[in-house]
Amino acid sequence: MSPRARVRRLALAAVLSLVAVPGTLTPAAAAEEVSRQVTVRSFDGTGIVTYFFRAPGLAAGERRPVVMLGHGWAGRAETDPAGGTLASLLGAGYNVVTWNARGFGSGGEANVDDPRVEGRDAQAIIDWIARQPEVRLDRAGDPRLGMAGGSYGGGIQLVTAGLDRRVDAIAPTIAFNSLLNSLYPDQIFRSGWGLLLCSGGLQSGNRLSWQVTKGCVTGMASGTVPKDVADWFGAHGPDYLVKRITAPTLLLQGTVDTLFPLREAIANYRTLAANGVPVKMVWFCGGHGVCSTKPGPADHVTNATLAWFDKYLRNKPVDTGAAFEYIDQNGVYRTAPSYPPKRQGTLRATGSGSMAFSRADALQYLDDGGQDGGPGGLPLPAVAAQPAAKAVNVHLPAPAGSGQAVGTPQVALRYRGLAAKSRTFLFAQLVDRETGVVIGNQATPIPVVLDGRPRTVTRTIEAVSWAVDRGSDIDLQIVPITGLFDYQRAAGAVTLTADVTVPLATGQAAPR
């Protein structure tokens, strides 16, 4: 099989597995079992294919709340009432509405959860829902309505709730705060997932807006995105829309999500909490990536979602638990009253070293190297950072006792170097030497200027959730390349000193 054909195969496999979260199953297409199917006309006349599933056991004349369930990027609506998240919601007694997003089985082109497009599509569906006889209304035209779904189906919840006060509760899973910061942090293209999302977006008759296509082509070719495309993605938010949300919000984010990392949920949580909105954040082992540690109870995310809806859609006296829950590598959930949890101390270290690098460092990621193991058979380095042989290593001293490294570490570099292309990137990752894994599978880009002058740069790196004790053996690695982002386009050498701080927290074991 040619490399190009292999990329296409892997890309499709990845897109089909994008929104796998604990407690859900892959939906099967079973249109004949749908209660009813309609085409809802959106603001511009585009038809949005929509499915309505009646709550089981609904008595004549009875009305119940409804949950809109969105699908992932390049996917289709769930239509099998016996499987997936659809089955969980129906089993809990809710009416459920699913739909094919614009460009993905419906008319028009995908505009990536644009409030001006997909946001208005969702509002048109709510208008239609309000006319359905099975749906409980708070007032005329205003259904008692929640929203669920992951990834693309999580982002649309934040967009819609920011646009429309008729949304009463949301549970976005592995969603984002800023598409621009997720896909193009510090102006470097997230090429691992970027390639897969771009390729998958063009499969199965899908249609993408020209801005998406342009961003894909230029991002993969140059590692950068043109200003007009960057501005277009920036206008999608949903960061500025989250400020408008009043609906109680359950944020479910993956500790090993290398497309929409934990920082995306943290930003949403902080905004909502500051505005007094009822909000809870759960970190689970999953998302866009590979959970290579113990995943914890399989039904944890589903149970948290159903409890949230029971409380805020049905007004049941349900205990939804602490405002922050997080899982460690041992599959243990802990809780804290809020995020960030109370500090127990910090792990600090300083180390120095030198390394040379070039474009040839990318060769290790172009060869399979026996590293299949990502979603759908993907090469693992494209979605999960790997320990590096070429690195400046800074060893973190183990704590005096047991605790949890929870939150956002910080790295400061003092460096000097020379490179043919002076503006480039290094990457920071935390490696657990005992297990041989990069914590959270995350690598964070750090922009550097290698022009021979002494310089400094400070960055927070991706958030972590990792149990530590006296036997912990953790290194900070500063590396010249990672499979998660655009390859190293410079050739040169750098000498650096790195200071790293990792927060430690106190937390209680979550009730089972």
Image (tube, rainbow, N blue to C red):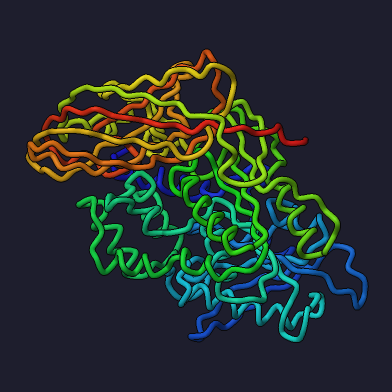
Q: Kindly identify the residue that appears in the image at 83 percent across and 70 percent down.
A: 64
Q: Quadrant of residue 328?
A: top right
Q: Quadrant of residue 420?
A: top left
Up/down of 251 relative to 133, above or below: above
From the viewer's perspective, tell me whether residue 397 is left or right of residue 184. Answer: right
- Closest to the observer, 130 or 347: 347
Check the image and name the residue furthest to the right. Answer: 60
Up/down of 60 relative to 43, above or below: above
Q: Position of residue 206 (x, y in %)?
A: 44, 64
Residue 199 can be seen, yes or no: no
Q: Kindly identify the residue that appears in the image at 75 percent across and 72 percent down.
A: 144
From the viewer's perspective, tell me whether residue 33 is left or right of residue 432. Answer: right
Q: Kindly identify the residue that appears in the image at 26 percent across and 69 percent down.
A: 228
Q: Position of residue 186 (x, y in %)?
A: 29, 51
Check the image and name the residue furthest to the top. Answer: 471
Q: Position of residue 316 (x, y in %)?
A: 85, 59
Up/down of 363 relative to 236, above or below: above
